[in-house]
Amino acid sequence: MFDPDEIKRIAEMRRDWEENELREFLERQPEQQAAYRSASGIPLKRVYTPEDIADTPFDEIGLPGRYPYARGPYPTMYRGRLWTMRQIAGYGTGSDTNQRFRYLLAQGQTGLSVDFDMPTLMGFDSDDPRSLGEVGREGVAIDTLDDMEALFEDIDLERISVSMTINPTAWILLAMYVALAQSRGSDLKKISGTVQADILKEYIAQKEWIFPIRPSMRIVRDIIAYCAQHLPRYNPINISGYHISEAGATAVQEVAFTIANGIAYVEEVVKSGVPVDSFAHRLAFYFVAQADFFEEAAKFRAARRVWAHVIKERFGAQLQESMRMRFHCQTAAFTLTKAQPLNNIVRTALQAMSAVLGGAQSLHTNGLDEAYAIPSEQAMKVALRTQQILAEETGVAHVADPLAGSYYVEALTNQIAAAVTEILHKVDAMGGAIRGVEEGYFQKEIAESAYQTARQRASGEQVVIGLNKFVEEAEQAPVEIHRVDPESEARQIARLAATRARRDDCQLRGLMDELEKQARDPQANLMPITVELVKARASAGEIVKRLRAVFGSYAETPVF
């Protein structure tokens, strides 16, 4: 990209600077650390020059909206459309969360994101003894289609994009969403949104699963194939690095492990006879924005570049849109502290800025009180206003990929992309992501990274303001905490009982038998029968229980 003679001249200039100005200055004022590294452990130079990117072809940096998409998936980026401001919400019953949705939309939020409670995630109904005390506590409780109707009451599903953070039971919640849209007469071709459905990262990091890995992969395949045929604007999976990072992975590991999982999903769907270009353009990703500002922005640029090469070169995609990585981003819950909670506003703002400069398509900013509980309305408003200030006041949305050309950012992008590719080769050599999960490779790597981070925090090597530096001994002012109505669990159980009392149990038994029959046929797609089941008011727990008899359950081999 640069004239070799000019690079040689710049190198000589740098060496002269090191031998004179720099050496003399260091004698008077030594640097604070002997060596500097990024949060992922990448060695950092004191200064970067064109030397550091002289071997980078401009085609690898490129232009926005053009392969390999390092500078963003769309030519105009935020000039054409701002990122979707998608604050996650979910607590109590469907009606409770519907009120929070309306509040957020009234404050200017442009997309919805749903958090589900632990029983819903794990396939237990609200009246199951194992759900006691957890119903509606850390997300909304959804047992049947009636709850889904309450959740989206008076919300236009054709107009608003909805993301659902659900994995083991993702296909059931998607079936409810489809059934709700159909009951309203909505055009499925106009429905947009995302269901997370990324089960591999559950085995790797978040640890919420029901079935063994292979049947779970079949369900993901069914979701992707169904959406490719029936919901052309819907993202059937959100391949998630966020939870991998929050479990302790570095930025490099987050991207590498996430893309390795993405490869496994594409292989599963292609193997079933679905052409890659019929679904790859609807695959979505989900990353975190951690504290290391420049590494995070470079991470997003590197992730797009690596994924574009994978889809084109490994899977032979022909359509340009198949090669575009689009991603949702969330600021890092791991960085939030109970100590001096107002500091969390600043942390979140800077992390959000790195996501925007890195080209995110949608963004959730954490509430200042999330180290305590589900965010209060006030905390959610401040978090949303943070995004709105970024969009409307700072000017960062005026130029596509404004960090491009920075010697440091481009060099860091190259280093991350190279490190990610090296890990992908390693995963390939062991037989792919599924084999890596089964052998505990990902789990061991994350555990080691998490341990090192814990040691660095404990020693003060990794500074956390208010926690291990600039600590205040005085008791802090209380933070407003969101509290779930203690009666919401009883109301949810009563609602489920009422639904069961009025449904046609004879019809339901026939549909359940058909579900089991299709589950035993590895070529059958489970989505259509599940849509019929939820329309008949089968509960999520009942569907899961029937499939456990076919698929069994998963028990993890502990990794130390």
Image (cartoon, rainbow, N blue to C red):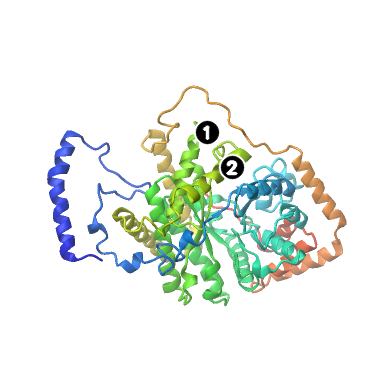
- Amino acid type, mark 2: Lys
- Amino acid type, mark 1: Lys
| Residue found at the far top of this picture | 474
- In this view, the residue in front, 378 or 91, is 378
User: Is the residue under label 1 in contact with that under label 2 (CB below 8 Å)?
Assistant: no
Q: Label 1 neighbourhood size at 10 Å, few (<14), some (14-19), many (20+)? A: some
- The quarter holding residue 399 reads bottom left
What residue is drawn where x is 56% and y is 37%?
369
Q: Secondary structure at mark 2?
A: helix
What residue is drawn where x is 60% and y is 50%?
108
Q: Is residue 140 visible?
A: no
Residue 412 image offset from top left, x and y in percent: 33, 55
Q: Secondary structure at mark 1?
A: loop
- In this view, the residue in front, 91 or 548, is 91
Query: Residue beneath label 2, please?
Result: 381
What residue is drawn where x is 84% and y is 51%?
498
Quarter in which the N terminus is drawn: bottom left
**Whole-number angstrom distance, CA of label 2 to CA of label 1:** 19 Å
Query: Residue beneath label 1, please?
Result: 338
Up the image or down, 533 lies above or below 491; here it is below
Q: Is residue 26 left or right of residue 396?
A: left
> Which of the marked residues, 2 or 1, is nearer the chain's N terminus?
1
Q: Is residue 406 left or right of residue 312?
A: left
Q: Is residue 373 left or right of residue 335?
A: right
Up the image or down, 128 lies above or below 305; here it is above
- In this view, the residue in front, 343 or 83, is 83
In the image, which disc is placed on residue 191? none
Residue 496 image offset from top left, x and y in percent: 80, 51
